[in-house]
Image (tube, rainbow, N blue to C red):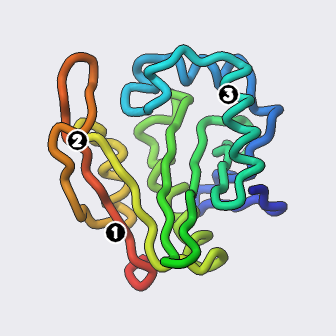
Amino acid sequence: MIIQNKLITKKGFIIRSISLDDCNEKYVNWLNDKEVNQYLETRWCEQNIESIKDFVRKQIASEDSYLFAICKQDGTHIGNIKIGPINNRYKHADISYFIGDKNMWNKGVATDVIERICKFGFEELDLHKIAAGAYKEAVGSIKALENNRFLREAIFKDEVRIDDKFTDVYRFALLNGNY
């Protein structure tokens, strides 16, 4: 789904609906970078312009998900955040995100955009609960979720692999009344 307005974070980052124009070599390079994709499921397949365009087309056409580009104030695309699929019956959704521009790592970007996407989810989508998963080793992601008052609800032991080693996935959630 697409929203017409941009969401602005407290630190001034812009969250806007992604478009096919965002599907460029820079985006492909992020998804193929072993450091950027180490906790993303896209790491299992070599990505190219057509694969990301296909993904973006599906997200734009989706009736239960929003895929956003995260941009600096000057409009430079630095990553993505998604909310969905949205379960309208139970009023919950997952979020997932990545910061592709490594120059923007460790600057609080994920914390900032998670906060704004939760505001959008709770206030505009009328959600009751927002959840996210994080690999045990994804310290930055875990910190960003905890900075936004997400609580760890579950540990899925040896759920996924990083290279040849199995590792845990933590499941976090935030209830509307706690954000």
Seen at 62% across and 35% down, the residue is 78
Q: Identify the amino acid type marked 1.
A: Arg
User: What amino acid does circle 2 point to?
Assistant: Lys
Q: Position of residue 121 (x, y in %)?
A: 58, 70
SS assignment at label 1: loop
Locate residue 143 relative to residue 68 in the image: left or right.
left
Q: Which residue is denoted by mark 2 in the rendering?
A: 136
At 74% from the left and 44% from the top, the residue drawn is: 18
**x and y, in percent, of residue 153 in the image:** 24, 64
146 to 101, vertically: above or below: below
The picture quadrant where one finds residue 159 is top left
Residue 166's spot in the image, x, y percent?
18, 29
Q: Nearer the viewer, residue 173 or 79?
A: 173
Q: Earlier in the sequence, mark 2 or mark 1?
A: 2
Nearer mark to the viewer, of 3 and 1: 3
Residue behind mark 1 = 149
SS under mark 3: helix
In terms of secondary structure, where does tag 2 sit?
loop
Pointer 2 or 3: first along the chain? 3
Dot label at residue 52: 3
| Label 3, residues with CA under 10 Å away: few <14, some 14-19, many ≥20 | some
Q: Quadrant of the N terminus?
A: bottom right
- Distance between the Cα atoms at labels 2 and 3? 27 Å
- Distance, label 2 to label 1, CA atoms, is 18 Å
Label 3 – label 1 distance at C-alpha: 32 Å
Figure quadrant of residue 75 = top right
Counting from the top left corner in percent of width and height, residue 63 is at 71, 59
